[in-house]
């Protein structure tokens, strides 16, 4: 009995299970009035960007490619879901399937153009493509609303709408985000612990070794890029029902850079690293630091704080925060052991 | 692909790889110049030459890392089919049973030794991306079989103790052995070793010699190697081809090569 529990505890799914209970609890505590709605909204942004970050982690952490087009794909997701639901009148589930299909096509297309190059050059090309996309969002006014933005508040989430029952709608959209996050985490773990994940990692480490072992570099780079695109589009498709508003200006280079920073700060090869990093980059300033009077009066000081954190981690802890915590844990366990043996002798 | 196979090339049944008139130019530099030789089935074939003679370039041409400027690479694959390698994609070469190692070890530093071997078994997996995404029973069964194969190879080469280690920090001799173990995961017919003894001490070199012999006998492979360590080459190889500045100097048994005046001149600078 105890053994079964220990096996369960050591399974990576256990952590995901506890985590999902915790974040569902946050929403329930919010309903009971213990947590402010604004805090929950900021947390939801963190969960949505964590989903995007998981895709980006496959691209950067496993395949070793840096793209700066992430935000424009999130933007694409927001417009896709609004268009499919508002203009074409499709149910949300169908909109999601269409969104994923478009992401696959789009990712493959962009990937084919850009994946023959790597490193800095890939970042620059994807940046250029992202700017083109944002420009299209700006100019295609009759679909996207242009710079004026696009508001749509009549999403129907399994029978719940904002107009009819706002509280249930708020709950539903949060739980959908949590569900997608949890499924993404599990599938992420499945991929990285399979030949596909190992093939990606071998491309990052040595393209020659990968090729000599029969791994097609282009195929796996393309796969990673398409997966990252799908996750970004899904992130956008969740963002829209949650915030019910999108505009070309939101998903700019800053968001792409922040997702890159989040994945690096947290630890680019771990689900907890990505979650932690996204929290630090996207959530820390609004959820934690704004509680401190100094940061409340000096609003922009938070950027110095997060900026300094990024520099410190990249310089001294390239493994990311998750590595820092793992090392701390080992150290503390060592201290406890030492203390116990000393106590035993005395 | 099928066109290539139908275009029958004649190959002596005892020969596994025939290099015919291989030339590789980088701009104005001729790295390999009209080089021809045959590697016989089951032998250990050594390619020697002074620094910069173009040995590694020959390897890179055979394994399609470079596309040769001209010349033909004819190979008898695991189904006894004759294949012209010039048309094979670099990542498909291993599927024909040709596997190589690298001069400076190219391991996957972020994976442990066991996983490094699983990477080498990549072409053995029949399961597709969706099997991997959902960890289907089909994939799990396959993973178990390939993992067992990896454990067996590790055991054969005496590497079991390093199974869960990461390559970083392991002795160079061990890393070289892991690369060798990796080649065995691919069910090879022809193993190409690029300076297997470089950077090893005498003891490690001796162990390596034994291991290569063991691989030749137990796994029924042909071995084609480039090496600077003359002692190793003379002891191990059945046939040796000496090249200099991309041109063939001589080919023959170790004794013949040792006695050849042209080879001596290239190595010792002549009288």
Image (cartoon, coloured by chain):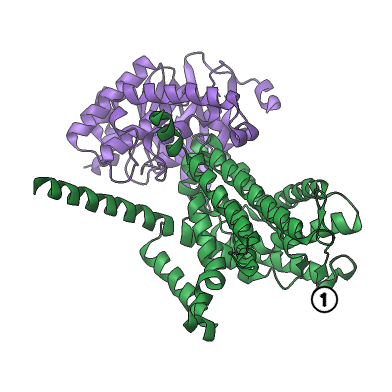
Q: In the image shown, does A312 or B218 lie closer to the viewer?
A: A312
Q: Does the image show residue A230?
A: yes
Residue B8 occupies quadrant: top right
Residue B244 occupies quadrant: top left
Q: Position of residue A43 (x, y in %)?
A: 60, 62
Outermost left residue: A346
Question: In the image, is B129 to the left or to the right of B141?
Answer: right
Q: In the image shown, does A194 or B167 lie closer to the viewer?
A: A194
Q: Position of residue B92 (x, y in %)?
A: 57, 32
Q: Is A268 located above or below residue A1 in the figure?
A: below
What chain letter is assigned to the residue under label 1? A
Q: In the image shown, does B68 or A255 lie closer to the viewer?
A: A255
Outermost front residue: A32
Question: In the image, is A307 to the left or to the right of A329?
Answer: right
Which residue is denoted by mark 1 in the rendering?
A148
Determine the colour of chain A: green
Give the SS element for disc 1: helix
Q: Quadrant of the N terminus of chain A?
A: top left
Q: How many marks?
A: 1
Q: Position of residue B96 (x, y in %)?
A: 55, 25
Question: In the image, is A246 to the left or to the right of A17?
Answer: right
Outermost top residue: B13
Residue B123 occupies quadrant: top right
Q: In the image shown, does B124 or B220 lie closer to the viewer?
A: B124
Label 1 Cα crowd, 10 Å radius (few <14 / some 14-19 / many 20+): few
Q: Is A9 located above or below residue A287 in the figure?
A: above
Q: Position of residue B224 (x, y in %)?
A: 39, 28
Which one of the lettered chains is coloured purple?
B
Q: Residue at x 28, y 36 (%)?
A: B174
Q: Does the image show residue B68?
A: no
């Amino acid at each position: 009995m105890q053994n079964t529990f220990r096996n369960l505890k050591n399974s990576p799914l256990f952590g995901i299970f506890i985590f999902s209970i915790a974040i569902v609890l946050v929403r329930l505590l919010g309903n009971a009035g213990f947590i402010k709605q604004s805090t929950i909204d900021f947390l939801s942004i963190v969960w949505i960007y964590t989903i995007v970050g998981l895709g980006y982690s496959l691209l950067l952490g496993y395949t070793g490619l840096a793209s700066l087009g992430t935000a424009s794909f999130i933007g694409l997701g927001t417009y896709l879901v609004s268009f499919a639901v508002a203009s074409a009148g499709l149910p949300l589930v169908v909109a999601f399937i269409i969104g994923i299909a478009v992401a696959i096509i789009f990712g493959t297309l962009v990937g084919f153009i850009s994946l023959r190059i790597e490193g800095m050059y890939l970042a620059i090309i994807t940046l250029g493509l992202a700017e083109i996309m944002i420009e299209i969002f700006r100019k295609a006014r009759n679909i996207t609303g242009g710079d004026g933005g696009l508001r749509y508040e009549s999403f129907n989430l399994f029978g719940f709408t904002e107009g009819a029952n706002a509280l249930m709608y708020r709950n539903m959209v949060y739980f959908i985000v949590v569900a997608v996050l949890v499924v993404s985490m599990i599938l992420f773990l499945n991929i990285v612990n399979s030949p596909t994940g190992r093939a990606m990692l071998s491309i990052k480490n040595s393209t020659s070794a990968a090729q000599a072992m029969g791994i097609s570099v282009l195929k796996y780079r393309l796969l990673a890029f398409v997966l990252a695109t799908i996750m970004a589009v899904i992130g956008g498709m969740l963002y829209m029902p949650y915030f019910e508003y999108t505009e070309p200006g939101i998903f700019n280079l800053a968001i792409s850079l922040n997702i890159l920073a989040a994945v690096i700060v947290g630890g680019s090869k771990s689900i907890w690293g990505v979650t932690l990093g996204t929290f630090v980059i996207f959530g820390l300033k609004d959820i934690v630091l704004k509680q401190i009077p100094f940061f409340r009066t000096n609003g922009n000081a938070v950027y110095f704080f997060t900026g300094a954190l990024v520099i410190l981690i990249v310089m001294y802890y390239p493994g990311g925060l998750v590595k820092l915590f793992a090392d701390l844990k080992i150290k503390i366990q060592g201290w406890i052991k030492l203390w116990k043996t000393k106590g035993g002798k005395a | 692909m099928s066109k290539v196979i139908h275009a029958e090339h004649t190959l002596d049944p005892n020969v596994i790889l025939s290099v015919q008139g291989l030339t590789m130019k980088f701009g104005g530099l001729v790295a390999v110049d009209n080089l021809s030789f045959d590697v016989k089935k089951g032998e250990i074939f050594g390619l020697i030459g002074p620094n910069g003679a173009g040995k590694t370039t020959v390897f890179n041409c055979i394994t399609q890392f470079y596309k040769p400027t001209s010349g033909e690479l004819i190979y008898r694959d695991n189904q006894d089919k004759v294949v012209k390698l010039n048309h094979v994609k670099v990542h498909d070469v291993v599927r024909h049973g040709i596997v190589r190692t690298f001069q400076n070890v190219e391991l996957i530093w972020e994976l442990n030794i066991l996983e490094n071997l699983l990477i080498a078994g990549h072409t053995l997996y029949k399961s597709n991306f969706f099997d991997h995404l959902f960890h289907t029973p089909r994939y799990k069964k396959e993973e178990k079989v390939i993992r067992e194969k990896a454990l067996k190879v590790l055991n054969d080469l005496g590497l079991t103790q390093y199974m869960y280690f990461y390559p970083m920090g392991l002795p160079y001799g061990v890393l070289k052995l892991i690369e060798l173990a990796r080649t065995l995961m691919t069910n090879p017919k022809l193993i190409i070793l690029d300076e297997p003894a470089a950077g090893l001490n005498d003891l490690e070199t001796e162990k390596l010699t034994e291991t290569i012999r063991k691989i030749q006998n137990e796994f029924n492979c042909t071995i084609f190697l480039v090496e600077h360590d003359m002692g190793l080459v003379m002891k191990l190889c059945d046939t040796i081809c000496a090249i200099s500045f991309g041109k063939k100097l001589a080919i023959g048994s170790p004794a013949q090569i040792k006695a050849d005046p042209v080879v001596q001149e290239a190595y010792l600078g002549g009288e």
